[in-house]
Image (cartoon, rainbow, N blue to C red):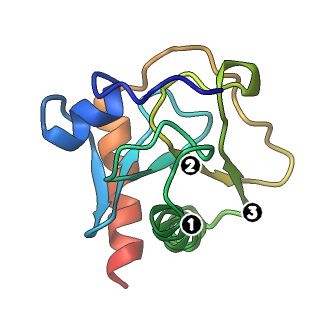
Amino acid sequence: MTEPYDDGNVFAKILRGDLPAERLYDDDSTLVIMDIMPRGPGHCLVIPKTAARNILDVEPSSLSAVMATTQVMARAVMKAFSADGVTIQQFNEPAGGQVVFHLHVHVIPRFDGVAMKPHTGTMEDRDVLKANADKIRAALAQ
């Protein structure tokens, strides 16, 4: 059994505007932000605007919106970074690797022969995040 949703999580705070984020895409159901501890250039996160701890408790319509936005973002990061591929990751509960307990999907551009950086907890420089975000926003606008 999963724990109840906690609206004090970092993504809920970003959605409310209580914390800053480098925003890439925003529609009625989803928000996309840059991951501040990226595992590669262009690593971004797709989050639903509804309260959902993870895939185990999300409403199907919200999950559908998240996946549609994930596809949009996968195409955008591939274009923005001339990537060879894209990794999509989603984790559920601590045993599944989940750290922030608001449903989110990782979208990470990938390049042949280049391993993903480990999750170190090291925050990326804000200027680098903004430059990468600008590339993605430009690809979305095309």
Q: Nearer the viewer, residue 36 or 81?
A: 36
Q: What residue type is disc 2 on?
A: Val
Q: Whole-percent x and y of residue 120?
A: 61, 14
At mark 1, the secondary structure is helix
At mark 2, the secondary structure is strand
Residue 125 - label: none
Q: Which residue is mark 2?
A: 105
Q: Which residue is mark 3?
A: 85
At mark 3, the secondary structure is strand
Q: What residue type is disc 3 on?
A: Gly
* Neighbourhood count class around disc 1 (C-alpha, 10 Å): few under 14, some 14–19, many 20 upward: some
Determine which quarter of the picture holds residue 12: top left
Q: Which residue is mark 1?
A: 67
Q: Nearer the viewer, residue 118 or 91?
A: 91
Q: How many marks?
A: 3
Q: Nearer the viewer, residue 42 or 52?
A: 52
Q: Whole-percent x and y of residue 63?
A: 53, 61
Which residue appears at 53% of the width and 33% of the height?
Answer: 38
